[in-house]
Amino acid sequence: MCGYERIDGGHAFEVEWDLPDECVCEKCRRPQRVHVEWGNRMQVVRDLDVWGQPGFFVYQPPFHRCGWCRHRQWLLPPFKRKHVTVTDRFEEQVLRMMIGATEEEVARRLGISAEMVRLIVNHRLQDARQINPQREITDIGLDEISLKKRHKLYATILTDLTDPDHPRILAVAPGRDQAAAENCLKRLSQRQRAGVQNHRTDMSPAYAAAGKALLPNSQQVIDRFHVAKKLGEVVDRLRKKDTCLQKEAVCAGEEAVSFADVGLSETTAATHGGGTSESGAAVRADSGVGSAVLFPLGGDRHF
Ligand SMILES: [Zn+2]
């Protein structure tokens, strides 16, 4: 991190990273020493919130030009994948927030569009990223997320809960049946599966069956969150039965899942909502934080 600028409704961090010495040309496949040039359009990438307001990474994008075929290729930063304008950890946050919430709720809370939320989930669904087989995993969670309320599209998320303060998403698979859960669990090595001691799930028999089949030494723990949700549903049903008179109060109670205000001003939120389904243009955050890209590179640093 080499610079900071407070922007309207958010925070912009200028970042740099170590560039590789060598690379392989994407076009002619020749390995070679990296020859760095810089793109002149500053890139703005959405990162986690800071003090309840959106944070952005800002950088001048480096690229390599092939010494043989002159092909240009971007030297990607270590904190994001290709063709997206959000960081990896922002993607993780979106997925975790999808547990127990809808796309619209997550989008509203983060000040991005519902399309962007869908795009991020889709990226992770197509992701064949390997789980590091050296990773020590003792506690995991299996959760379902609902992608589209009406069309009933579901996905299953496998989370590493070994360090409860830093849950990490390990895999995402389409569906919420036993096969979906097993698809996730099979991304762990056999040794890793044998090392799992607890798996937290909701009360779904499908996840219990997957755990039984693939986690020989693990105990199923019904997640407190899910139990609480189930109890809440029962209580709600009972309340609804005998509370015609208190109808308004009950409705107010049902709104209890409140989402923290991200602190975005109305105008900032509006500019973030302009995402389209095309991945490259999905987050037009850059247009929303125009002022962020104006601070001089290499000039006055704020640290
Ligand atoms: Zn080349």
Image (spheres, rainbow, N blue to C red):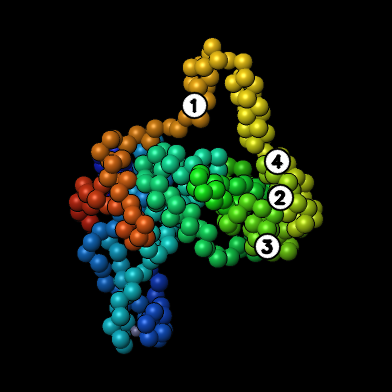
Q: Which residue is mark 2?
A: 206
Kindly identify the residue that appears in the image at 63 percent across and 25 percent down: 237
Q: CA distance from mark 4 to mark 3?
A: 21 Å
Kindly identify the residue that appears in the image at 73 percent across and 41 percent down: 221
Where residue 198 sits: x, y (%)? 73, 47
Label 2 near label 3: C-beta < 8 Å? no
Q: Which residue is mark 3?
A: 186
Q: CA distance from mark 3 to mark 1?
A: 38 Å
Amino acid, disc 1: Glu
Kindly identify the residue that appears in the image at 31 percent across and 58 percent down: 281
Kindly identify the residue that appears in the image at 77 percent across and 57 percent down: 213
Mark 1 is surrounded, within 10 Å at the Cα level, by few (under 14), some (14 to 19) or many (20 or more) other residues, namely few
Q: Is residue 200 left or right of residue 146?
A: right
Q: Which residue is mark 4?
A: 203
The quarter holding residue 77 reads bottom left
Amino acid, disc 3: Lys
Where residue 1 sits: x, y (%)? 35, 53
Mark 4 is surrounded, within 10 Å at the Cα level, by few (under 14), some (14 to 19) or many (20 or more) other residues, namely some
